[in-house]
Amino acid sequence: MAYLGQTLVILLAISLCWGKYEILNNQASENVYRSDNPKGPIVTPQPHYLKNQEKHVKFHECKVKFKYDNDMLDEIIGVYKDISFGKGYSERCTEASGGKDIQVEIKFDSKDKTYLPKGFESQHEAYSLHVDGKGNTKIEAKHYPGVVRGLDSFSQLMTRTKENESEYMMEYLPIEIKDEPSYPYRGVMLDTSREYFFPETIKQILDSMLISRLNVFHWHLMDDDSFPLYLESYPDMTNYTAFSPEEIYTPKTIKDIVKYAKVRGIKVIPGINGPGHVNILGNYPKLSSIISCYRKPVVNGLAYGSPHGGIINPLEEDSYDFYTNMMKDIHASFECEYCHNGGIVPEFNCWNSSQEIQDFLHQGGYHQNDLTQIFFSKRKEKAQDSAGHQMTNIYWYQSNGIKYQEDDILQYWEMGGKIDREFAKYPKNKFILSTSEMNINCGYLTPFGQNSQICFSPMSPDSYVRFPSMSQESKKQVLGVEILAWNQMSNEFDLLTKLNPHSGASSMIFWNSDYELKGGYMKERLMRLQYRLKRYGIPTSKVSMRYCEEHTHHCFGI
C-alpha cells in the first residue's frame, strides 16, 4: 500500500511538471451521456433551425469518411474525430472495417485562406448541416469558423451504442440544421498575472472553449502582481516582473498558442493595463520613473492586502515610449486586430500626491478624469503607429464620464441593474457583458478568507445563464458575453473545474438568445457538455449527482 501511495505521488508530480491534467486509463472518462427520456436530436447550443424525422443508422466509427478540398481543414477534422469518437481515433482506424461508409462532405468559401475573418459578425459562424436517412452528411459555410461550428454540431449527433464500443448510431434522420449565433462574441478572460498557467493548460482551456462553443480568448497579461510576457524591446524585464524565470511567455510560445486557437475558431485578444494596476512595472529599474506611487511589499503587523496599486505617470514621455515599444512587440506575437487596454481609472489620491501632476492640473484647469483622457488618447495614437495598422480598443467600462471613442468596445462588469442608464451614455458603442455572476470567483472566499462581495450567491450551473435585464435598445448594443477568470484563488489544478461546464451555459444563452433554458433543461444540456469534456480528457465539475446524470427525467422532470 505504501508503494502504491508513493507511485501516485510521483504521477502527481509528473503532472505538475507538465503543467496539465491527464485522465489516464480512466474508463469513466469513456462514459456516454444517455437521456432516460429522449425527445429527438439535442445539439448544444440549440440551433436556430432544426428539423428532423425518425430514421436511424448504425455504423463503425472507422467508416466515417470526410471529403473536402482544402488542407486548412486537416487539423480541425483530426480534432473532431477525437472529440466524436475518443482520443486515438487515427491510430485505431488504420485498417479498413466492414459496413457502409458514412460520407461527410464539407464545402466552404476559402479563397483567402483566412482562419478568422476580421471583426465580429454572426455570419462568420453561420453554417448549414444536412444528414440524409443513411447518415451521409453535408456541411456548408462561407467562413472557416462556420465549418468548425458545423463539425461541432455533427459530432453531437453521433452516440456510441451500448453493445459495441466501436459502433455508433445517428437517430432522428434526416436532420437539417441552419444556424448562426445571436451574439458573435462569447469569450473567456484568463488572468495570468495573478497566477501563471503553463502553455499546455492554456491549450486545454482553448479545447474546452471549442467544445463549449466559446470563440474569444482574452488573455489578461499585466497587473500589479506580475507581467510575465517577454518583450524584445526589454529583454531583461521579466527578471523583475515575472514570478520566476520558468514562468514566462516567450514570443514563440505566444505564436504557438495563437495558432492553436485559430485552428479552433478562437480569436486571442491580449490584455494590458493602464493607467492603473501597473505597480509591477516599477520593479524594473528602467521603468521606475514612469510609475507614480510605486511601492515594494512592506512587512508590518498593521496591514495586509493585495499588491500596491501603482499608476502610470501620464506626464512622462517615457510612459508612451514604453507602450509604443510594448505594443510593437505584442503585435509581432499576437497579430492584434483587437487589444484590451485595461482602462481602470486609478485612485486619484496617488496623482493628488504628485506636485508635478497637481501643477499640471491647476495650470490647465483640468480634472483627474481629464488626465485619464489624455493618457487614453496619447497611448492609443502611439500604439496604432507602432502596430502599423488600425486596432480596435477594448476597455473596462467606468461610469465616471470618460469620453470613449465610438469605435471603442466597452466591457461592462458592474452590477446589472444600471445597464440601460449606462449604455444610454454611449449609444454608438458596443458592449461586452461581464456582470458579477459571470465571474468564476462568485461565491468563493477572498484571498484573505473573507466572504466574497462579487455576487450574492455561490456559483452554480445556473449562475451564468441569466441574460441581464435590459431594454430592447440596450440589447442592440450588446456584442456578447465574457466569463472572467480572475486568478487570485485559482491554479493549474482547479481552474478548469471552475470554468467547466459552467462557462458553456453562457454560450448556450448568447448563441441562441431566443431559446429559453431553465432548471432541469439547462442542467441536462450542461451534463451533456460535461460528458463531452470529460471524454476528451478535460477536467470539469459535476452538474448533479451520478444518479441524476443517468435519470435526468426522474430527477428534473423533463
Image (cartoon, rainbow, N blue to C red):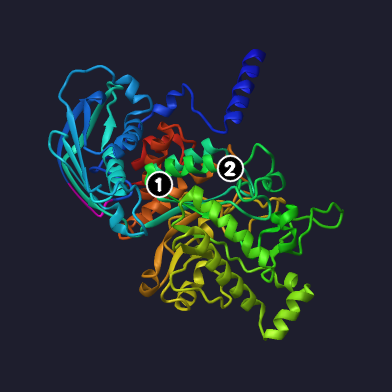
Q: Secondary structure at mark 2?
A: loop
- Viewport quadrant of the N terminus: top right
**Residue 492 in the figure: left or right of residue 519:** right
In the picture, residue 552 is in which quadrant?
Answer: top left
Residue 339, horizontal then vertical, whole percent: 50, 58
Residue 508 in the image: above or below residue 385: above
Residue 455 vs 550, above or below: the answer is below
Q: How many marks?
A: 2
Please tell me which residue lies in front, 15 or 75: 75
Q: Which residue is mark 2?
A: 249
| Location of residue 553 (image quadrant) | top left
| Direction from residue 384 to residue 82 in the image, left or right | left
Magenta region, mostly helix, strand or loop?
strand
The residue that disc 1 covers is: 523
Residue for point 46% across, 51% down: 335
Residue stretch rendered in magenta on the structure: 47-51
Name the amino acid, label 1: Lys
Horizontally, is 331 left or right of 153 in the view?
Answer: right
Q: Is 471 within the magenta?
A: no
| Amino acid, disc 2 | Tyr
Q: Residues within 10 Å of mark 1 (few under 14, many from 20)?
A: many
